[in-house]
Image (tube, grey):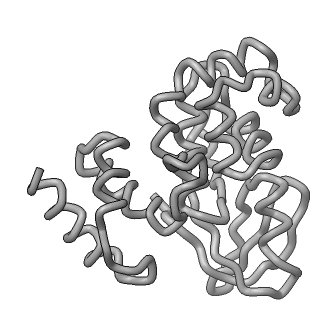
Amino acid sequence: MIHFLEGVVDSRGVDHVVLNVGGIGFLVKTSSRTAEEAGPLGAEAVLHTCLLVREENPVLYGFAAAEERALFLELISVTGVGPKVALSLLGAMRPGELARAVVSGDTALLSKIPGVGKKTAARLCVDLASKLDAYVGTDGGVTHLADAELVEALTALGYTAREAMDAARKVETGADAPLELRLRKALQALSAR
């Protein structure tokens, strides 16, 4: 899998960015918000990516942050929510706002987003409320973006999202510390319980 791309913005549209990485132009499908935030033409940009193969057509999806990519993968796991609808959701709301809407069951807000009807909004709330609860802090705020990478690593090792978030909160190193160090400390916290 292509985990991220770092390069120069060659062109962009409402739903995509072409990133020039070492002379190769990668067409990356994005939410409208990510396409806007990628910067002007010629600017350096980093996109966290996810490669999906649907009906033998590989498509590269890009996100401004690892947390946004993780949320995208959760969204497309819901029946009736494909990449297009997931990008529409992420374009309309920031990851924390979207997680809060799902966890609180705000189907009225979710169904205002293009491509999301009442049934899809209800299904999102039912299927993802417990999973996305980890993205919402105890004060209703969003967990730190740098923790998303650590949580992703811990869930890849087989821990639940809740266990991973609890361990990430216990890590006392700064968000700018290397992932390896933060992962080691999180694993120590998990083994101590």
The residue at the point 56 percent across, 18 percent down is 126
Spot the residue most to the left: 192
Q: Residue 55 lies in what quarter of the image?
A: top right
The residue at the point 90 percent across, 61 percent down is 13
Query: Is 52 above or below relative to 46?
Result: above
Query: Is 45 above or below relative to 167?
Result: below
138 vs 101, left or right, is left
The residue at the point 66 percent across, 59 percent down is 62
Number of dots carrying numbers: 0
30 vs 154, left or right, is right
22 vs 147, left or right, is right
Spot the residue most to the front: 139
The x and y percentages for residue 59 are 64, 49
Query: Is 184 above or below relative to 125?
Result: below
The x and y percentages for residue 72 are 60, 44
Question: Considering depth in this image, is 149 or 167 the residue closer to the camera?
Answer: 167
Query: Is 90 above or below relative to 185?
Result: above
146 vs 187, left or right, is right
The x and y percentages for residue 155 are 32, 48
Q: Residue 1 lies in what quarter of the image?
A: bottom left
Question: Considering depth in this image, is 51 or 181 the residue closer to the camera?
Answer: 181
The x and y percentages for residue 50 are 55, 54
The residue at the point 65 percent across, 60 percent down is 63
Spot the residue most to the top: 119
